[in-house]
Amino acid sequence: MKKIAILGQPNVGKSSLFNRFAKRRIAITSDMAGTTRDVKKELIDFDGKEAEIVDTGGIDESTELFRSVKNKAIEAAEIADIIIYMVNGKSLPDGRDKQLFYKLQSLGKPIALVINKIDNDKEEERAWEFSEFGAQNQFAISVSHNRRVGQLIEWIKSHLDEPELVLELDDEDDALENLISRFDESGTLKEEENLNEIGVAIIGRTNVGKSSLLNALLGSERAVVSDVAGTTIDPVDEKIIVKDKTVTFIDTAGLRRRGKIQGIERYALGRTRQMLEKADIALLVLDASAPLSELDEKIAGLVDEYKLGCIIVLNKWDEALGTYDEIVEELRYRFKFLSWAPVITVSAKSKKRVHKITDMLLKVYENYTRHIPTRELNDVIKNATIKHHIPSFKGKAVNILFASQYEIKPPKIALISNRPKGIHFSYIRYLSNQIRENFDLEGTPLILIPKKRGEREEDNSED
Ligand SMILES: Nc1nc2c(ncn2[C@@H]2O[C@H](COP(=O)(O)OP(=O)(O)OP(=O)(O)O)[C@@H](O)[C@H]2O)c(=O)[nH]1
Ligand SMILES: Nc1nc2c(ncn2[C@@H]2O[C@H](COP(=O)(O)OP(=O)(O)OP(=O)(O)O)[C@@H](O)[C@H]2O)c(=O)[nH]1
């Protein structure tokens, strides 16, 4: 049985709509705000298709009850298959409505923005004000005058035909919930979140110039801070302040010692892993004065494995073995999986161009923590699927119903599909290229995961 939730602030007309659907008066309609306290449920027959309809209490931040009522509404939305978000067309769009609407939209379910109390043609104009929500399904109706309610019912019926998808509340839904609450309605990260600490791992095989690069990076900034917390002798991490960000170079003590003492490949890879675990961005250092080696590739592979932001640093550029084009072409060919990573040529010894790395670190981190607003993301996906249709799978049509980013560091996007396993990886690569063309994601992996609604992460695809 599909569940439909009717949500919205008090007095917008939820109970009235509920009653109209129920074709009998169960709830008491009143002019006093906040009269519908309890969640009501009713089985409704939509021309032979049954659905359970849920009317929740109003969402009113000004009352003490707000918290519990809002939570109830969100709970109802979580278990619902179809969400009707109702606003009062007689008043102006409200920031709280917008915020909650986006939050609900990100659940990835069919959701309609219903602008009620548009009682006549003249009031129609006011409904346009709500276009700024950018809702894909928007209905301007009047419950009391029975205007356009039929269109809303048709829309509901079209979603009752879809096969029922199981929604499980799992860790990922929690993650989604967490993520969404970290952004305001325009998709900007709220101030209080601390995204000001960037963990950077300088990695590469022995003798490529990692220590020299570290020194150049530390020396190039005036505000050098040594972090002695957690250790009494060796500074474990060293930091620089770049603009409003703290860049922490991970395990610099080890970096300074490592190759000099050990130099065993396996050990080096183990240490690299330890660093990558703590990092946001890897500076993959390569030696431009020597041919690329298998070990370079292995280390680069770790960046891919850990899904970190990455800048490829071609060091010893003063003694480069070829032209920029030659070296970069070879590098791109070998490290196809890092095609999104920018390349910077430097000379750590002479500190030439090293400052380019600090600038790029900030940019890559911005992209690594980027949250793409749901509506813009869906526009891109929609256009992409119009340009190139999703190939059918075993003779059956494959659709993407909805896309939603549910993680940052790096951006992770769920592609909600009727046949998630039917989306070929080459098509996913195409989509991720389309997304990259529309949003700045230089230096960050982008992960697209086809899913059935409410499904746990199992089918993993990335670019
Ligand atoms: N003009 C106009 N008034 C409407 C319309 N729909 C509902 N109303 C009126 O708006 C008021 C609130 O309607 P309710 O259905 O109780 O609203 P609610 O959202 O359930 O409100 P709470 O119970 O407070 O959460 C009532 O006086 C309704 O008669 C409409 O389409 N046009
Ligand atoms: N020509 C040239 N030599 C460099 C440059 N950067 C570093 N070197 C030299 O390369 C050698 C290795 O530099 P390190 O910084 O110790 O390299 P590393 O990667 O830390 O080495 P391990 O600690 O062994 O892993 C040293 O002799 C440096 O002087 C550069 O930009 N140009």
Image (spheres, grey):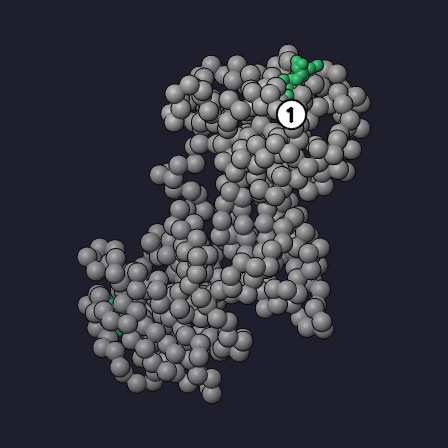
Question: Label 1 CB, ligand 2: below 8 Å?
Answer: yes
Residue 305, horizontal then vertical, whole percent: 61, 43
Identify the residue at horizontal 57%, vertical 16% (top origin).
Answer: 216
Q: Secondary structure at mark 1?
A: loop
Q: Which residue is mark 1?
A: 263
Identify the residue at horizontal 67%, vertical 21% (top origin).
Answer: 207
**On the picture, is 262 further left or further right than 135?**
right
Would you say residue 363 is visible in this rendering? Answer: no
Displayed quadrant of residue 414: bottom right
- In the displayed structure, 52 sits above or below 131; it is below
* Quadrant in which the N terminus appears: bottom left
The amino acid beneath tag 1 is Gly
Identify the residue at horizontal 37%, vertical 76% (top origin).
Answer: 53
Residue 355, horizontal then vertical, whole percent: 57, 20
Residue in front for this viewpoint, 24 or 213:
213
Displayed quadrant of residue 25: bottom left
Residue 344, horizontal then vertical, whole percent: 66, 26
Would you say residue 2 is visible in this rendering? Answer: yes
Residue in front for this viewpoint, 322 or 100:
322
Identify the residue at horizontal 44%, vertical 43% (top origin).
Answer: 188
**On the picture, is 395 further left or further right than 145?**
right
